[in-house]
Image (cartoon, grey):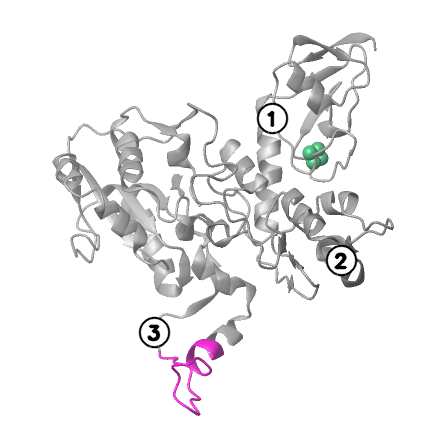
Amino acid sequence: MQNISFIIDGRICTTEKGTNLIEAAKQNGIYIPTLCHFKNSHELGSCRVCTIKLNGRAIAGCTIKIDEGMEIEVNTPELLDTRKAILEMMFVEGNHFCPSCEKSGDCQMQNLAYETGIRYTRFPHLFIERNIDAGAERIIVNQNRCIKCKRCFEEIRTNDGYKVFSFLNKGSKTVVSVDYEQEAKLSEFEAEYAMNICPTGAILVKGKSISKPFGNRLFDQGIEGKKIPFNKTNINKTNSLKKRVATTSLAGCFGCHMSMLDIDLGLLDIIEVVEFNKSPLTDIKKFTQRCDIGIIEGGCSNTHDFEVLRTFRENCDILVSVGECAIWGGLPALRNTIPLEECLKEAYLNSLTSEDNETIIPNHEDIPKILNKVYSNHEIVKIDYHIPGCPPNSNHIWSVIKNILFEEEYEIAYPEFKYD
Ligand code: FES
């Protein structure tokens, strides 16, 4: 086969004519992220995570076969941001609760989010109500996690050639459904294969979860030696040595505050350089001075959270959301998929601990009003930094805070950056 030349980001590359671009780029040492693409023979082109520019036009890279003289852009700032935005859209469109997902650590979408540096999403989460279809003999389809990549459509067929998976509905209501009759014809191996080729945790097999121990999963190690530089913006340097810090916990579990305390004796070093103002750590209830930095744990679930958050924005130069609940709502946001009235009835009238014949849902003017959904903090006020994790490691939290306040050099090692 004839070798031809083409250009990626101004660099001359060579490959055989007709090679798939993802493969050709790899041969020349260039990585293009992909998600739906898993075989060069299958050009699904459904996720667009591999978006590149060919002769100036944006296109899914996995659908391109290399020809002589092609000029391709891969890693321009615009394309890096486009690919990140596409992934963020997938996260907000589905209900991806990584800490409670069986595929966590083995999930390609989760790993790609780490790789592309997603720490929060610029779009609001939609929290669309979706089903978990457990009606088939062995396969469970969790529609909350499906990204409609079509891998399962293409790859999973019965011996007599019938497809097992297909789309149901149209537009934003599209979901993957499983044909129970055909699914029953799959062997154990084929059912597990369906689970393994799913790039998220949407396809599972009953009784066969991804059961590798933590630390030994597909993406636990990351790229060896990889460090993610922590980019500082909006640093408000002041001359005084001690910086003032405020902290609060909104709709969260206080786990992030526990993690902050987990630094143990390191706290003595911290208080050499910072002093705490309003915070559960000091029990100071109201701001007594303007603060350099405010650390927010938890998201906004009721009117009180909303007011506290606005007070923090008014009284702090820099605001940092710490932990998953602050960043996108976290576990409290599970209620976003259920109508508020149903949640209240479940909590106050129908729960195991409710009195028999209970009819009252508490509603007094002194009780903060619950919001229609749990909001991430950056939907309410401007947040300057996000520290993901559930909870983030204590050293990591304080290293980031010190980096912001004092510009101490800090790079995040991959395992430290990776939370699930
Ligand atoms: Fe190319 Fe999904 S990897 S469109």
Amino acid type for the residue under numbered disc 3: Ile
Q: Residue 363, image x and y in percent?
A: 39, 79
Q: Which residues are magenta?
A: 345-364
> Badge 2: how crowded within 10 Å, few (<14), some, or many (20+)?
many
Residues at circles 1 and 2 in contact by the CB criterion of under 8 Å: no
Q: Which residue is mark 1?
A: 78
Q: Is residue 345 visible?
A: yes
> Of tags 1 and 2, which is closer to the observer?
2
- Image-based side of 127 in relation to 36, left or right: left
What is the spatial separation of the Cα atoms under label 1 and label 2, in whole angstroms?
43 Å
Q: Residue 215, image x and y in percent?
A: 42, 39
Relative depth, front residue between 287 and 3: 3
Disc 3 element: loop
Q: Is residue 349 magenta?
A: yes
- Mark 1 or 3, nearer chain start: 1
Magenta-drawn stretch, dominant element (helix, strand or loop): loop
Q: Residue furthest bottom?
A: 357
Q: Which residue is mark 3?
A: 367
- Image-based side of 383 in relation to 173, left or right: left
Q: Which residue is mark 2?
A: 183
Please tell me whether residue 88 is drawn above or below residue 61 in the rendered image. below
Quadrant of the image where one finds ligand 1: top right
- Residue at 31%, 37% (x, y): give it: 396
> Badge 3: how crowded within 10 Å, few (<14), some, or many (20+)?
few
Q: Residue 284, image x and y in percent?
A: 17, 55
